[in-house]
Image (cartoon, rainbow, N blue to C red):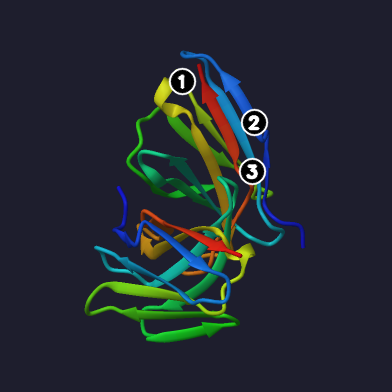
Amino acid sequence: KAGVTQTPRYLIKTRGQQVTLSCSPISGHRSVSWYQQTPGQGLQFLFEYFSETQRNKGNFPGRFSGRQFSNSRSEMNVSTLELGDSALYLCASSLGQTNEQFFGPGTRLTVL
Amino acid sequence: SQQGEEDPQALSIQEGENATMNCSYKTSINNLQWYRQNSGRGLVHLILIRSNEREKHSGRLRVTLDTSKKSSSLLITASRAADTASYFCAGGAVTGGGNKLTFGTGTQLKVEL
């Protein structure tokens, strides 16, 4: 099976812009989670989607949003970008609850 | 917020030696997972131990879980240069009907030839 894919791999944006990141899970996986990784805060949970519904959300401002499509592909959007949003954004898929999560290579976002 | 601390933050050993990393977590979990990350790339799942298990093996990996102390350890035996990476523990919990991982701070392992 193909692994989790994320596009784009790298992005450079300026403050105030918005960005959309995409994630395609492993075939058959219905749960998609998003994480932010920064040197200062480490790996932090953003949100999880299952069957097009957000099941769980981390402690991030409303500028961070996401959605999941009927084919389980997911997108996350960050509006009004801030310098502090520069990070590696990781997507992970799993079969469901209490299962291991399989991560994509990440999208490295740089906000100038 | 981070799940907890990992100890040590950095570890440097010689090839062939064993590497032990410890993880403490703060909240209730359904399982404890360990991941490896090479140079800021994606995370690779290593092993999952459920909350009702005490020890699990997978190849050169041995994981223990002590729920009474809210701690876990990862042992890599006979380490290789290719094991050089950052290792993260993550507590898996079902909250709000959903699946959520809360990561530790990570241990940077360097295996030297």
Instruction: For marks 3 and 2, give the one nearer the viewer.
Output: 2
Q: Secondary structure at mark 1?
A: loop
Q: Measuring 58% from the left and 71% from the top, which residue is drawn there?
A: B15
Q: Are marks 3 and 2 in contact (CB under 8 Å)?
A: no
Which residue in the structure is indicated by mark 2? A10
**Residue drawn where x is 59% and y is 50% of the image:** B42
Give the mark, 2 or 1, whose residue is nearer the N terminus.
2
**Which secondary structure lies at badge 2?**
strand
Quarter of the image where the N terminus of chain A is located: bottom right
The answer to whether residue B49 of the structure is visible from this angle is: yes
Question: Marks 1/3: CA distance?
Answer: 20 Å
- Vertical placement of residue B62 versus A51, above or below: below
Please tell me which of labels 3 and 2 falls first in the chain.
2
Along the line of sight, the residue nearer the viewer: B52 or B16: B16
| Between marks 2 and 1 in the image, the one whose residue lies nearer the viewer | 2
Task: Please give the chain letter of the residue carrying mark 2.
Answer: A
Between discs 1 and 3, the one toward the N terminus: 3
Badge 3 is on which residue? A23
Asked if residue A97 can be seen in this view, the reply is no
- Image location (x, y in percent) of residue B41: 60, 47
Q: Chain of mark 3?
A: A
Residue identified by numbered label 1 = A81
Labels 1, 3: front one: 1
